[in-house]
Image: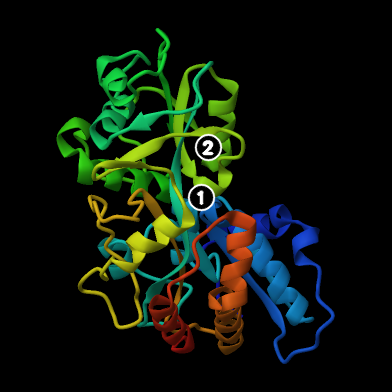
Amino acid sequence: MIQRGSAAAAAVVIAAALLTGCAVNEMGDTPSDLEGTIDGSGASSQSAAQEVWVAGFQRANAYASVNYDPVGSGAGRTAFLAGGSDFAGSDSPLNDKELAGEHRTCAEGTTAIDLPLYISPIAVVFNVAGLDELRLDGPTLARIFADDVTRWDDPALVELNPGVDLPDAAITAVHRSDDSGTTTNFTEYLDAVAATEWGAEPSGTFPYLSGESALGNSGVVAAVEGGRGTIGYVDASKAGQLDIASIRVGDDFVQPTADGAAAIVELSPRLPGRTEHDIALDVDRASEEPGVYPLVLISYLIVCQEYRDANTAELVRAYLTHIASDAGQADAQDIAGSAPLAPSLRADVQAAIDSIQ
C-alpha cells in the first residue's frame, strides 16, 4: 500500500471513508480480479457523478471499493500532493508550481497527470421576486460580482433586459468561500470577456470581500435560495429549481447546456509544456462560435503517472477506464447533467489511463 506522507493528509482519507457513506460503498456481486480500496477527494461538482461511477464500478467488481469525499478542489489537490489520497478531483488542473513540487502519492521521481473526465456548464443562478428570466453579458456579470453594479434596476441590467420589470432592490452576489475550481473557471471567464470590469486575476479563491460567501456548490445554492435579490454561480447540475440567467455569446443569449459545454471543450487545445499524457485544456472563454457555452467547468481526475504500489495503479486504471467509458459518461450525463467526452478527447484520455503504472 502507499506510504502516506502526513498525518494531516491521511485524516482526509479517513474522513472520506466516513463521509461518503455505506450506500455508495456496498460491494457488488460480480467477481473480478480486482481487490482493494482506493481513496479520493476533491471537487464537489463531481459529487453526483462520483456516486454513480463508484456504484457502477463496485457492482462490476465485488472485491474493489472506492471512496470519494467532495471537500472541494483545493483540499483535494492538497491531500493528493501530500500523499493523503490516491487521486483527486479538481475543477482546475495542477498549476506549474504544483506540477514542479513533490507528489508523495506517486513513485519517487515521477509526476501526476490531469485527465478531463467531467464536463459541465456553470450556471449563473438567481432568486429575485417576480423575475424568472434574466439576460447578462460578461461586463455586467463582472461588475455585479466586483460590487460595481449593486441594484437590480441598474441601467446596465435594464438595457440588457428590455421590457422586463426589474425591481428597485439590492443585489446580493454569492461566491464560494473555499478554494474552488468552480471559482477558478468562473473568474477565468470574467477575465477573458471583461478584464477591465473584473479587474482581478483568475483565482480559485474569490478576490473581493463584497457580497456573501458560502461553502461548496451546495452552500451557494442554499444561500441563493434562502436570500432575497441573490445571484451566484454553481455547477449547472446543482442548480435545482433556481432560475438560471442567459449569457451573451456573440449576438445571442444562451442558457447552459451539455451540448454547448461539449462544443467549447472540443475547440479547446491543450495547455503547452505538459507531458504527453497530461491533458490540461486551454478553454477559449471569449469564443463567439455558434452553439458554444464558454462559461464551462472542466473537472479533472488527478492521478499518478506511476504509483508506489502496483495494486493501487491497477485499481486506479480500472476505475478511470469505467469513468471514461461510454456507459460511465452516459451515467454521469443522466444523473449530473454533464456533457460526455467527444470521441477524439475520450480516445486521448483512455490512452493516458492505459499509461498509468
Q: Residue at x 53, y 41 (%)?
A: 216
Residue identifier under label 1: 72
Query: Under tag 2, what secondary structure?
Result: loop
Identified by mark 2, the residue type is: Leu
Q: Kindly give the residue lying farthest to the bottom in the view shown.
A: 33
Residue 195, position in %: x, y? 17, 39
Residue 65 visible to the viewer: no
Residue 33 picture quarter: bottom right
Residue 126, position in %: x, y? 48, 28
Q: Are marks 1 and 2 in contact (CB under 8 Å)?
A: yes
Q: How many marks?
A: 2
Q: Is residue 199 above or below residue 123?
A: above
Instruction: Say the numbered circle drawn on residue 215.
Output: 2
In which quadrant will I find the N terminus? bottom right
Residue 52 picture quarter: bottom right
Residue 308, position in %: x, y? 50, 83
